[in-house]
């Protein structure tokens, strides 16, 4: 097994015109880069499985989890794999085309920005199975593409219930990477969960403008904590590092983050996570794609009870966090479990509201 990482060259072009750009110098540069990294040996690996991640590794979250689980599955099943960092949206289409020409069996990529490049490239490589994690269903469907969405907002609703019970100030915050419909829905569900417990509680949202800017996360979180907010739900991937750093500056500041890898970043501040296990999702979807009964042209909505999304307390916080907060968290946990059961059996309805 071999693992290569590609980083596309930075570029300031208008994303709306990225297809035109790909026909020019930027496209040629991406082709040259991909050819250099993949080399002739990669082009011969028809059984290759490739992950194209559009956020950088080292995020203690989605990307690190996906790479680790792809490596694990490659070891178990004995296939060649690649982890390719596509930093610049202008190069997505070229990278996907290069992988198709390389004879990749499966290509997995992430987040809404890859939808249009998938639509442009996938129909030309019908022997490659294409999987988009965190994407809407294609209309019309493409026979060799599977899209996967995540009902993360349901976990955020549970976090809101938890936050409302633990907050001493009655002020909650939410920090997202970028204001897009699914993340807006996450905030609205967080707020709805909190107000189902306390109608007088306030919840405000802010967006860093990036999923990879810890410095901006630190700035926003510090301002929120200064304003009296004592519980922040994150939804910002690597930007979360700065949010957690701000929470670490003073006891009693709480964060609900995204991934178990973040527990250790805030032993006495990361009290919980709304976990979205991208690694588990990738493992599940690639395992299906390697089977004979893979159903292309379909969409999977992944929610609570799937082993991919859940709301969980931090075991590290339970050992190192303030006793009063741990005691209160234990006291209210039955309420969380009851709400979760209600969501699963349909007796609790959580609105999917994308307007901020």
Image: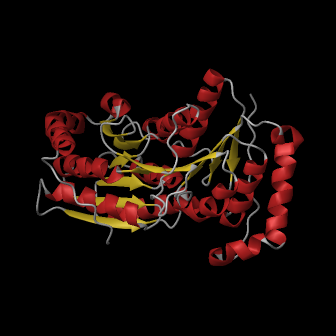
How far across and how far down the image is residue 298, in percent?
46, 50
Towards the viewer: 192 or 269: 192
- Residue at point 48%, 56% (across, down): 135
The outermost residue toward the top is 76
How far across and how far down the image is residue 316, in percent?
38, 31
Towards the viewer: 210 or 285: 285
In which quadrant will I find the N terminus? top right
Q: Which image quarter: residue 340?
A: top left
- Residue at point 21%, 37% (across, down): 329
Q: How many labels does the image show?
A: 0
Let me know if residue 225 appears in the view. Answer: no
Towards the viewer: 116 or 82: 116
How far across and how far down the image is residue 60, in percent?
53, 42
In which quadrant will I find the C terminus? bottom left
How far across and how far down the image is residue 74, in percent?
64, 28
Q: Looking at the picture, does residue 135 appear above or below residue 63?
A: below
């Amino acid at each position: 097994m071999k693992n290569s990482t590609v980083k596309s060259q930075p570029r300031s072009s208008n994303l709306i015109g990225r297809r035109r750009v790909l026909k020019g110098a930027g496209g040629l540069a991406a082709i040259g880069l991909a050819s250099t990294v993949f080399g002739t040996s990669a082009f011969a690996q028809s059984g290759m499985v490739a992950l194209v991640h559009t956020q950088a590794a080292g995020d203690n979250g989605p990307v690190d989890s996906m790479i680790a689980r792809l490596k694990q599955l490659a070891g178990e099943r004995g296939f060649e794999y690649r982890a390719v960092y596509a930093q610049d949206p202008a190069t997505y289409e070229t990278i996907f085309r290069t992988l198709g020409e390389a004879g990749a069996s499966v290509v997995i990529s992430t987040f809404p920005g890859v939808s249009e490049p998938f639509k442009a490239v996938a129909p030309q490589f019908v022997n490659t199975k294409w999987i988009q994690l965190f994407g809407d269903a294609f209309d019309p469907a493409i026979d060799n593409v599977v899209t996967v969405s995540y009902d993360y907002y349901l976990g955020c609703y549970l976090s809101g219930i938890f936050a409302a019970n633990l907050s001493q100030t009655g002020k909650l915050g939410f920090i997202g990477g970028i204001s897009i419909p699914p993340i807006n829905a996450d905030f609205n569900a967080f707020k709805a969960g909190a107000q189902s417990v306390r109608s007088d509680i306030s919840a405000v949202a802010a967006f860093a403008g990036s999923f990879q800017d810890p410095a901006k996360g630190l700035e926003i979180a510090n301002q929120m904590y200064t304003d009296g907010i004592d519980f922040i739900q994150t939804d910002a991937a690597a930007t979360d590092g700065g949010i957690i750093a701000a929470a670490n500056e003073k006891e009693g500041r709480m964060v609900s983050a995204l991934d178990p890898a973040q527990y250790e970043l805030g032993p006495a501040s990361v009290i919980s996570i709304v976990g979205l296990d991208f690694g588990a999702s990738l493992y599940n979807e690639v395992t299906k794609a390697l089977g004979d009964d893979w159903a292309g042209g379909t969409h999977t909505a992944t929610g609570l009870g799937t082993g991919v999304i859940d709301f969980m307390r931090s075991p590290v916080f339970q050992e190192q966090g303030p006793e009063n907060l741990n005691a209160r968290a234990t006291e209210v946990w039955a309420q969380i479990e009851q709400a979760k059961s209600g969501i699963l059996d349909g007796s609790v309805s959580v609105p999917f509201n994308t307007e901020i």
